[in-house]
């Protein structure tokens, strides 16, 4: 079976009856052709059978046309319904996405503002701490410089005294 036969299976009952009908017509035609009848009678029978077959064919064609129109109308209605449903769902999704986008944007803006405020506050605190620390470091550096200056003066005085002692001891040895 090919894909079309699998997807659209033929109704076995109607196929069977179509086969019986076509076989019956072929059998009747064969019986008429091979039956011993005079030509005029044979032509009349063939004409009657042809008229009967033509009428049946027109009847079947009418039924098929009606069913086709009904199916086409049903398919059109279903397609319209489906298109409406898809359109409504797409609209709902678009609205939901749009609302979510606005909520996210508002949340981000608010969070950004809070973050900016926090950073500003922390920055001010850090600036104040750095200013205080630099004052303390400057004072400490001044104290260390003063101590170094005093120590340097003491060392210079001691070096001067040691120099004097060395001179005095050098002079006394000569």
Image (cartoon, rainbow, N blue to C red):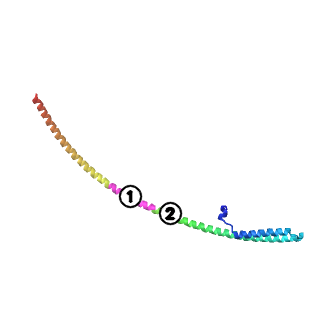
Q: Left or right of 58: which side holds 97?
A: left
Q: Residues within 10 Å of mark 1 (few under 14, many from 20)?
A: few
Q: How many marks?
A: 2
In the image, 117 versus 140, the foreground residue is 140
| Residue 50 highlighted magenta (yes or no) | no
Gap in angstroms between the C-alphas marked 1 and 2: 26 Å
Q: Are marks 1 and 2 in contact (CB under 8 Å)?
A: no
Label 1, secondary structure: give it: helix
State whether residue 102 is above or below residue 135.
below
The residue tagged 1 is: 115
Specify whether 143 is left or right of 77.
left
Image side of residue 51 versus residue 103, left or right: right
In front: 136, or 174?
Answer: 174
Q: Position of residue 131 (x, y in %)?
A: 29, 51
Instruction: State the extent of the magenta-drawn residues as a range.
Output: 104-124
Q: Answer with left or right where residue 139 lies relative to residue 122.
A: left
Q: How packed is label 2: few (under 14 Cα within 10 Å), some, or many (20 or more)?
A: few
| Residue occupying image coordinates x 53% and y 66% | 92
Q: Say above or below: 145 vs 172.
A: below
- Image quadrant holding the N terminus, namely bottom right
Tell me the tag on residue 97.
2
Q: Disc 2 on helix, strand or loop? A: helix
Residue 11, position as x, y percentages in the image: 69, 69
Check residue 118 for magenta coloring. yes
Residue drawn at (55%, 66%) of the image: 89
Does residue 45 show up? yes
The residue depicted at 83 percent of the width and 69 percent of the height is 31
Q: Position of residue 68 (x, y in %)?
A: 70, 68
Instruction: Name which residue lies at 18% across and 42% down.
Output: 151
Residue 117 sits in which quadrant? bottom left
């Amino acid at each position: 079976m090919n894909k079309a036969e699998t997807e659209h299976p033929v109704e076995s009952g109607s196929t069977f009856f179509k086969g019986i009908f076509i076989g019956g017509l072929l059998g009747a035609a064969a019986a008429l052709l091979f039956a011993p009848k005079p030509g005029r009678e044979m032509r009349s029978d063939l004409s009657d059978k042809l008229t009967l077959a033509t009428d049946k064919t027109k009847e079947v064609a009418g039924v098929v046309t009606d069913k086709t129109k009904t199916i086409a109308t049903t398919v059109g209605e279903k397609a319209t319904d489906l298109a409406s449903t898809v359109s409504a769902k797409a609209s709902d999704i678009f609205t939901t996405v749009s609302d979510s986008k606005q909520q996210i944007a508002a949340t981000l803006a608010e969070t950004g503002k809070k973050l900016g405020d926090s950073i500003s506050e922390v920055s001010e605190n850090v600036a104040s701490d750095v200013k205080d620390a630099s004052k303390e470091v400057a004072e400490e550096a001044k104290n260390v410089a003063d101590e170094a200056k005093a120590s340097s003066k003491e060392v210079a005085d001691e070096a001067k005294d040691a120099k004097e002692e060395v001179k005095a001891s050098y002079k006394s040895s000569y």
